[in-house]
Image (cartoon, grey):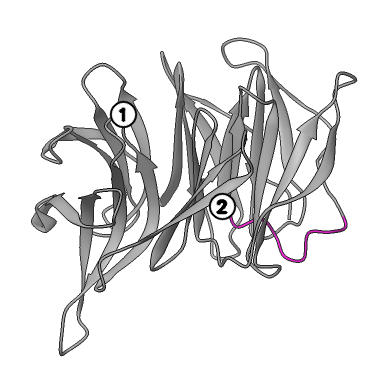
Amino acid sequence: MCGIAQLGNEIFVSSDSSPSIAVFVFQGQQNFVRQKDIGFKQLTTPPQDIATSADFQQLFVADLGGECIWQLQWLSRGEFVVEGQAVSKVKPVSLSMNASRLLVVEKRRLIIFLTSEKERKPIKLPENLEAEHALETPCATYIVCGQRVAKPDGVKKPSIMEVNRQGGPIRECDPQYLGLPCYLSAFSDVEGDLLVVDCQNQRILVLSSLLKVVRVFLDVVQPRRIVKSGHFLVGCVRSSNHRGVVSLYWPQKSMLQTLPD
């Protein structure tokens, strides 16, 4: 399980066991219809992550092998066409989207791509921080989850850190509550709360805007991704061959079909 994104009533799911992106149409509670998969020859490896822009009706696909982010444009006849590389010469770990700003996450830096201006701005992360995912906040800071590498022994500890636009640390979550935080999602736009996927402790936490643990939101087996869009889409790995499922939570849980091999 590598990516979940939503655009309108369409849900996109990527897996590291498949080079194509599965598409489902959400037609109400517990009603999903599988559509034609998205695949394109330019993609060199299975998508590392995916993200969508509602403002520009675009789908972004992280290609780790090709060291780039592909930009696909939605057409009126219901298809996506490859427009080219939105960002090149990167080693993407994950993606997130904030209006017209695409956030490309690498292990040691963040890259802000302004889709409307075709401009990129790199942000170097603290030296000992290895990122897994990040979100831009309404205050133009960035919440980064991953691990901190202690010196000189190289021991890794879980970390969720807020950094400024220069990459300087502002605050950090108490690591005693964390196993391995691997993905983030907004929870409350009003209060600025966050959802954190902890794949090691197999749960999803709610954090306040000050990065204080509020409560356990869900206990989930092998979670990898979560996306909030009125409801919550949770992606989980189910076996050693990296096949996965996506579950819908809110107001109750229902299941999307198992991803193809």
What secondary structure predominates along the stretch shown in magenta? loop
Residue at x 65% of width, y 67% of height = 67
Q: Which residues are magenta?
A: 41-48
Question: Residue at the top extreme?
Answer: 28
Image quarter in which the C terminus is found: bottom right
Q: Secondary structure at mark 2?
A: loop
Q: Secondary structure at mark 1?
A: loop
Residue 27 image offset from top left, x and y in percent: 67, 12
Residue at x 37% of width, y 48% of height = 134
Q: Which mark is residue 138?
A: 1
Residue 97 image offset from top left, x and y in percent: 50, 37
User: What residue is pinned by disc 2?
Assistant: 2
Which is more toward the observer, 182 or 52? 52
Which is more toward the observer, 181 or 75? 75
Does the magenta run of residues contain 45?
yes
- The picture quadrant where one finds residue 218 is top left
**Residue 49 seen in the current view:** yes
**Which of the two marks, 1 or 2, is nearer to us in this view?**
1
**Residue 218 seen in the current view:** no
Mark 2 neighbour density, 10 Å: few (under 14) some (14–19) many (20 or more): many
Q: Is residue 41 above or below residue 221?
A: below
Q: Is residue 99 above or below residue 211?
A: above
